[in-house]
Image (tube, helix red, strand yellow):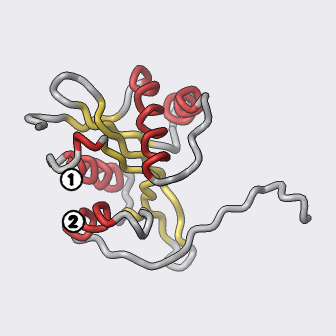
Amino acid sequence: MVSVALVRRAHPEDLARVAELAAEHAAYERAAAPPADLAVRLDKLLFGTAEPRLRCLVAELPDLTLAGYATCAPEFSTWTATEYLHMDCLYLTADARGHGLGALLMAAVRREARELGLAHVEWQTPTWNEGARRFYDRLGATSKEKLRYALPATSGTE
C-alpha cells in the first residue's frame, strides 16, 4: 500500500529507472522493447537543451522508489489550429496501481499543459487496456476511436 507519494519532474539521476519503467511499459503494451540507450536519449531530450521539448514526470514513493512516470510534449492540431499537450506515456508498476498515483500523475500533466498555456491534453491507450480506459473515464476524459499507424521514413518504396 502506498501511504504518501510525490509526483515531480524527473531529474537526470532518475533516467535509468525511467528507462526500466519504459521497458516494463512496452512489455505490458505488447510492444517492442525500447533501445538499450534509452536513458541517454532521454537525457538529451530532457536536459540537453535550454528549452526541452519533452517533459517527464515521475511518481516517487515514500521510500524514494520511482513507481511510475508520464511523458508529454506540445503538439499541434491542424483542425483547430491550436497547440495541445500530447501525453505519450503514463505507466505505473502493478503494485503502485489503485492507490491514487495515476490521478496524481494526470494532475501533474494537466499542470504542465496549463504552464505552457495549452488548453487540453490528448493521449491514446490500447483498446484492450480496460483498466486504463476505466481510469481515464473516471477522470472525465473522452475518447475517440482511431488507429495509430507508423511508417519508417526510409521505406525503400520511394
**What residue appears at the point 55 percent right and 36 percent down from the top-left corner?**
45
Q: Nearer the viewer, residue 96 or 108?
A: 96
The residue that label 1 is drawn on is: 103
Q: Nearer the viewer, residue 1 or 82?
A: 1
Q: Identify the disc placed on residue 139.
A: 2
Q: Position of residue 88 (x, y in %)?
A: 46, 53
Disc 2 from disc 1: Cα separation:
8 Å
8 above or below 153?
above
Q: Position of residue 48 (x, y in %)?
A: 56, 28
The answer to the question of whether label 2 and label 1 lie on touching residues, with beta carbons closer than 8 A, is yes
- Is 8 left, or right, of 116 in this rendering? left
Q: Quarter holding the N terminus?
A: top left
Q: Nearer the viewer, residue 124 or 26?
A: 26
Q: Quarter holding the C terminus?
A: bottom right
**What residue appears at the point 49 percent right and 43 percent down from the top-left corner?**
54
139 above or below 91?
below
Q: Nearer the viewer, residue 32 or 52?
A: 32
- For residue 33, which quarter of the picture? top right
